[in-house]
Amino acid sequence: MARVFSGIQPSGGMHLGNLLGALRNWVAYQHEHEAVYCVVDLHALTTAPDPAELRRNTVAAATLLMSVGIDPERSTLFVQSAVSEHAELAWMMECTVGFGELRRMTQFKDKSDRTEFVSAGLFTYPALQAADILLYDTDLVPVGDDQRQHIELCRDIAERFNHRYGDTFVVPAHVIPEAGARVMDLQNPDDKMSKSLESAGTVGILEDADGVARKFKRAVTDSDGEVRYDPEAKAGVSNLLGILASATGRTPEAVADDYAQYGPLKADTADAVNELLDPIRTRYAELSSDPAEVARLLHTGADKARTVAVATLKRARSNAGLLPRS
Ligand code: ATP
Ligand code: LTN
């Protein structure tokens, strides 16, 4: 059975891009594969969040993952910092990746342009991400399009390590959905929808149905009035088509054929999204009333994850020439 691994940052409210680009595949994969999913709180530290907020967001992210359908009995669901092997292997990854390789990462360029204090951790972030993935002998990594470059770098790191020290890691592949891999901000359709950019064009998974409908109604389009899928020339309209296609399991081109005007396209997209979000919102309200149970499930998940992580780290340490631990 193939092993699947993916992670999400507890950096704020999760949004429609996270759901369509990644989380829906996470849910599907737990039925076909051995799935390991992680709330990557160490990655969130790269931007120095407020401690109380980080704690709250970590619990909220785990609760949301359970609400979208990650079943902690079936999958391994845990918080990254609870398995300290991630941080330890990350150092070995930092010594395997090149400075020039990290410098080429577009997410680093984007994020460092937006912050005043650029931590070294923000720069080495993909090395920690590679450690996350490689610790679990991962075959497949379901992610949105923005993570393509990081997973490709992870492959290069794994191959370099294997070449230097002998066969140690499984070399993983990314899985990116056809529709929904890049959900754009409804107000700035040239930017991807994001947790950390405060924007009226971000659709939160837990937002109420009226708020969601209002955001779609106000979505930025263009003035030529033609419904056509052309992400370059018609970013706003194409984003709506992509969202509706992803929510209904069709292609954006086929969806475009059904519409002659923007108004009905916006209304139907909002309805389809609300249909997807309704059961998640209900489940979140139920689960968040019992945080002790969420904490218990996460501890069980960390124990399961640690068993695999310890064995992989031991192999990596030994192959690289570090002495055994007493
Ligand atoms: P941040 O803004 O804090 O970087 P984010 O919104 O980009 O956060 P992540 O935690 O970095 O979210 O990503 C979780 C998963 O969601 C990743 O697999 C990522 O590729 C996917 N994802 C994030 N934004 C989008 C988007 N706009 N469209 C499709 N997938 C997305
Ligand atoms: N870097 C990713 C989050 C992430 C991840 C991972 C994704 C951390 N570790 C391992 C897949 C596999 C992001 O910013 N979305």
Image (cartoon, helix red, strand yellow):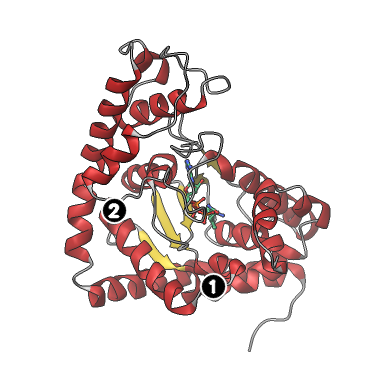
User: Which residue occupies 40% across, 14% down?
Assistant: 227
Circle 1 or circle 2, nearest the eye: 2
- Residue with the most extreme bottom position: 326
Res 304 visible: no
Disc 2 packing (10 Å; few <14; some 14–19; many ≥20): some
- Give the number of the disc on residue 206: 2
Query: What label sits on residue 138 in the rendered view?
Result: none
Gap between marks 1 and 2 measured at Cα:
36 Å
**Residue situated in front as seen by the camera: 236 or 273:** 236
Expressed as whole percent of the image width and height from the top left, the position of residue 187 reads: 46, 38
- What is the three-letter code of the residue carrying label 1? Val
Q: In the rendered image, which quarter contains the C terminus? A: bottom right
Find numbered disc 1 in the image and state the secondary structure of the residue it sits on: helix
**Residue 53 in view in this figure:** yes
211 or 78: nearer the viewer: 211
Q: Which residue is mark 1?
A: 310
Amino acid type at circle 2 is Leu
Q: Residue at x 72, y 68 (%)?
A: 120
Which image quarter: residue 45?
Answer: bottom right
Image location (x, y in percent) of residue 75: 34, 57
Picture coordinates of residue 16 (x, y %)? 38, 43
